[in-house]
Amino acid sequence: MARFWLTGIVLLLALGLMACGGGGPHGGVATPGAPETTAPTGEATPGEGFTITDNLFESEEKGYNVRIPEGWSPRPNFFPGPGFSVDAFFAPDLVEGVQPNISIACDQIPEGTTLTLKEYSDAKLQAARGVAQVEPDVSSGEVGGQEAVVARYKREKLEPAVEKTEFLFVTAKCGWDITLTVPLGRGSDYQNLFEEFLNSFRLLP
C-alpha cells in the first residue's frame, strides 16, 4: 500500500507544478517522458506504445483508448516511474496562470497479487489529504464499465491554487487514476469536457 500512497504524492506534486504552465507550449519546465505531441487532425501519429488517429489516443502498452479534447495536446508517457506511468493531456492555453490538464495514471499491480478498489482508493485519498491538506469529497461513479471512486478536492494552500477531480478504479493489470486539474473555482467550466473524456474511455481487450 505504501507504493500507491507515494505514487499519489509524486503525481499530485508533479502535475500540480506542470499545471502552472510547464506541461505544454506555454511552459518552460523540463518534462520527463516522451517529446510533446500535438493533437492530430487525420492521419495516425505513431509513437512508442501508442497511436493517435483522428483525436483517438490509443495506448497499446497500457491497454486503453480515449478521445483527446479538441485543441488539447497529448503527452504520452509524460511521467514514467517504477511501477507506474502517466499519459497527460493539456489544454491549449493558460487560464488564470494554470494550464488545465487531464492525466491517466496506471499503477501496475505486481504479478501474483490482487488489489481491491477500496485498498487503492484509500491509498490515493491518503495522498490527497497529505498534499492538499483537505478532506476530499468522495462519491461513486463509473469509467469504461468499471466501478469507480470519485474524489473532488481543492488545493488552496500551495501555488498554483487548483481543484481536482479524480476517478479511481482497478483492473487486473492496474490501479487507474484519471484526474482533471483546473484553476481554483473553475471546475464547472470543464465538467462537460471531462464527462465527454470519461465517456470516451475504453479498456482494450
Image (cartoon, rainbow, N blue to C red):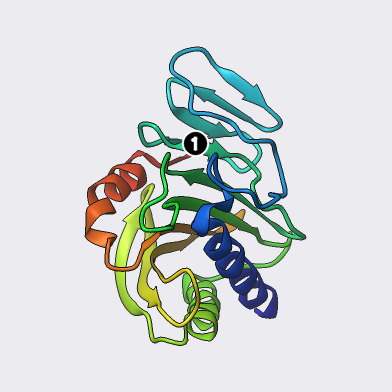
> How far across and down, in percent of the image, does residue 21 sit?
52, 52
Report the quarter where the N terminus lies.
bottom right
User: 200 above or below 88?
Assistant: above
Q: At 55% across and 43% down in the image, what residue appears?
A: 24
Label 1: how many Cα within 10 Å (few below 14, some 14–19, many 20+): many
Residue at image position (37%, 80%) is 136
Residue that protrudes farthest toward the top in the picture: 43
Residue 38 to residue 154: above or below: above
Taking the image as shown, residue 133 lies to the left or right of residue 51, namely left
Q: Quadrant of residue 146?
A: bottom left
Q: Say which amino acid is labelled 1.
A: Ser
Depth check: 10 or 90 in front? 90
- Residue 172 occupies quadrant: bottom right
Q: Is residue 58 above or below residue 134?
A: above
Q: Quadrant of residue 161?
A: bottom left
| Nearer-the-camera pick, 133 or 18 | 18
Labels in figure, total: 1
Residue at image coords 43%, 57%: 98
Quick one: SS at disc 1?
Answer: strand
Mark 1, residue position: 73
Residue 58 position, x and y percent, is 53, 32
The answer to whether residue 6 is above or below residue 105 is below
Residue 92 position within the rendered picture, expressed as x and y whole percent measured from the top left: 43, 39
Residue in the picture at 64% in, 22% down: 46
In the rendered view, does 152 fall on the left or right side of 64?
A: left
Residue 87 visible from this viewpoint: yes
User: Is any atom of residue 64 visible in this view?
Assistant: no
Q: Looking at the image, which is closer to me, 105 or 191?
A: 191
Which x, y percent locates residue 129?
48, 84
